[in-house]
Image (cartoon, helix red, strand yellow):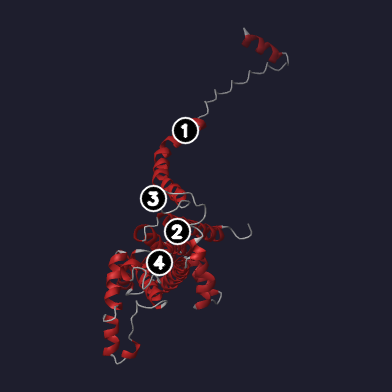
Amino acid sequence: MTSALDARRTRAGASPAPAAPPAPPARKPSRGLRDRFASAGFLAPAVLLVAGLLLTPFVMTLYRGFFSDSRVSGFTWFTNYGLFFSDPVLAKSVENTLMWVVGTVALPLVLGLAIAVMTNGSGWSRVARLLVVLPYAISGSAVAVVWNFLLTTDGAANQALDALGLGSFAQGWLLEWPGNTLVMIVANTWQATGVAVILFLVGLQTIPPETLEAASLDGADGLRKFWYVVLPQLRTVSVIVVGSSLVNGLKSFDLIWVLTQGGPGRSSETLAVSMYQETFLALRPGAGAAVAVVLTVIVLLASWLYLRRQLTPKGA
């Protein structure tokens, strides 16, 4: 009936009636909230595990740092933290820690970058990488045993100097400050340079060859090409190397403890060693907790400041 009416309207010059628009498809219910709850459920065990193993001990250590060291612990406010200003041992420990930070950041960075550049693409690169990376696979205690064999008064280093007629340069490498701290930083560098070499080699291999060819066509060569083309493209790798070296330098313990135990006279202690000394040997748990809290704050603050500066886009 409707089709006949439309046909008559068409013959009469009238336009047919417009067709009804199709019904919109039914909207599916939003799943955003359900997905968020599901993600939170999967993440909850990991978050609770981290909170239980990391945050809870830190809060307990922070709480313990405000109490005295006697059996009947009395609240002493910031007395334990004031030891950093009144105790010369802790002041020396802070000084040694700063030396460790500078040495363990600068030396692996410079040596790792230099070795990576020299061995990248060379015929003997595999052998060189193996020799450099092998110490990184050794534990810190084992590295300390090796260097103790070299650096004791009658060790291999002094014997080699005597054999070469340079006996006047022989000395007790681990018996005087700051020489003992400097040689331990060198020993740590011997172990830590390997991972820096690996990271820089990965960074060098990800540099597009087109940028190097364009730099050569523009007349950049040698040091200029490295400084203005290669080094800026290694910025991300450099951030990783410096960040990891910074944290490792601040918490160095095993190498120092095996070589000198913080001596002589606690002169070569870092904050990590002082924390152990105060807590377990001097039986001052309040002071040890204060040292642990200060060390944790320094590590977190230094890492945050460095990463924030390096990863923030320029001009932001």
Look at mark 3 in the image and give the residue it sits on.
71
Q: Earlier in the sequence, mark 2 or mark 3?
A: 3
Q: Are marks 3 and 4 in contact (CB under 8 Å)?
A: no
Q: Earlier in the sequence, mark 3 or mark 4?
A: 3
The reply to whether residue 121 is visible in this rendering is no
Q: Residue at x 40, y 42 (%)?
A: 46
Look at mark 4 in the image and give the residue it sits on.
196
Q: Secondary structure at mark 2?
A: helix
Horizontal and vertical percent position of residue 37: 47, 33
Give the residue type at disc 1.
Answer: Phe
How packed is label 4: few (under 14 Cα within 10 Å), some, or many (20 or more)? many
Q: Classify 149 as above or below 9.
A: below
The residues bearing labels 1 and 4 have C-alpha atoms spaced at a distance of 41 Å
Q: Earlier in the sequence, mark 1 or mark 4?
A: 1
- Residue 291 got which mark? 2
Q: Nearer the viewer, mark 2 or mark 3?
A: 3
Q: Nearer the viewer, mark 4 or mark 2?
A: 2
